[in-house]
Amino acid sequence: MAIGFNLALIAGLLVLVWAARAAVHALILRGLRAPRVAAQTSPQALGLTAVPVQVPGPNGKPLFAWFIPVPGVAKAPAALVMHGWGANASMMISSAAPLSHAGFAVLLLDARCHGASGDEAFTSLPRFAEDIEAGLDWLALTPEVDAARLSVIGHSVGAGAALLSATRRADIRAVISISAFAHPYEVMRRFLASHHIPYFAVGWYVLRHVQSVIGARFGDIAPIRSIARVRCPVLLVHGKDDDLVPFEDATRLLATGVPGQVQLLAVQGRHDPIEALQAEQSKLVDFLQAQLAPPQ
């Protein structure tokens, strides 16, 4: 009888552990689903001629984008613009006009689970990178674009994803990284602390399980690791008063990057990409023009 009681107790404990793990898994998936926000404006509102397109995305998920060609130019250099977590392409539109006027074709892309793009169970920095690469594949096959002169502009998670893509894509000629964090582990630790979740009791398991869900170790996808392995010039743009990602992250990325290949542009403002895009748009355009100049 005692043996039967012990077995029942063990079985009950196993059920509780399984139920707790399932609950944590569900909460993590929920946390990895960014809030979907509708587009706030469109390129047409800025007087730009933009074509809404469906880019074939990973796992058969369509990615919504606005494509802005350069009128009268058959093979223009191109910039793919990727937003950050919980945002969408409309929040990066302020980059479109100066790029277009400077002769760049522009692809403003919605990542999966964002804007008008296809849905998934979750999204992550690696999935942002996959979406960027799907957009680059689409640009490379577009007649109005010079496939040998492609660049990526990313904000926050989109910036980290742009750096990750630049470690494995030789066709990315330049990256502008706006407000990139140095390491996702640090971001997650700050998130846990802000929600008063104890690390040693709960947090360590949450972070370990998140890495299992997204299929990548934080250390392997961290921007501070990627920037040491990128194959192209990088311009880091970071607000001096960024209240989400400390400015120190930008200086650490600069110190880790290949000397002479990575530059840092400090701007007034916080984490909002619009502040950087509007205040320093000429410097961003100048950087891309220098890197994507046609071969002599």
Image (tube, rainbow, N blue to C red):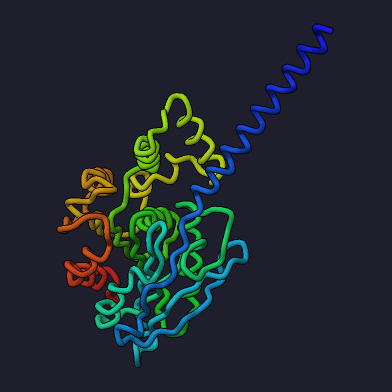
Residue 29 in the image, given as x and y percentages of width and height: 55, 47
> Residue placed farthest to the right in the image?
1
On the image, the x and y values in percent for residue 27 come to 54, 43
As rendered, which of 169 and 43 lies closer to the eye? Answer: 43
Is the N terminus in the top left, top right, bottom left or bottom right quadrant? top right
Residue 54 horizontal side relative to residue 267, left or right: right
Residue at 25% x, 80% y is: 102
Q: Which residue is drawn at 72% across and 23% down?
A: 12
Residue 217 horizontal/vertical position (percent) = 48, 40
Q: Which of 271 and 109 is in front in this view?
A: 271
Residue 84's x, y, as percent? 38, 59
Number of callouts in the render?
0
Q: Residue at x 33, y 69 (%)?
A: 92
Where the C terminus falls, by quadrant?
A: bottom left
274 left or right of 162 in image: left
Instruction: Indicate left or right for 8 with 25 as reference.
Output: right
Lateral position of residue 4 relative to residue 294, left or right: right
Which image quadrant for residue 282? bottom left
Which is nearer the eye, 238 or 163? Answer: 238
Q: In which quarter of the image is residue 187?
A: top left
- Quick check: 257 above or below 288? above
- Residue 26: image quadrant is top right
Residue reaching furthest bottom? 72
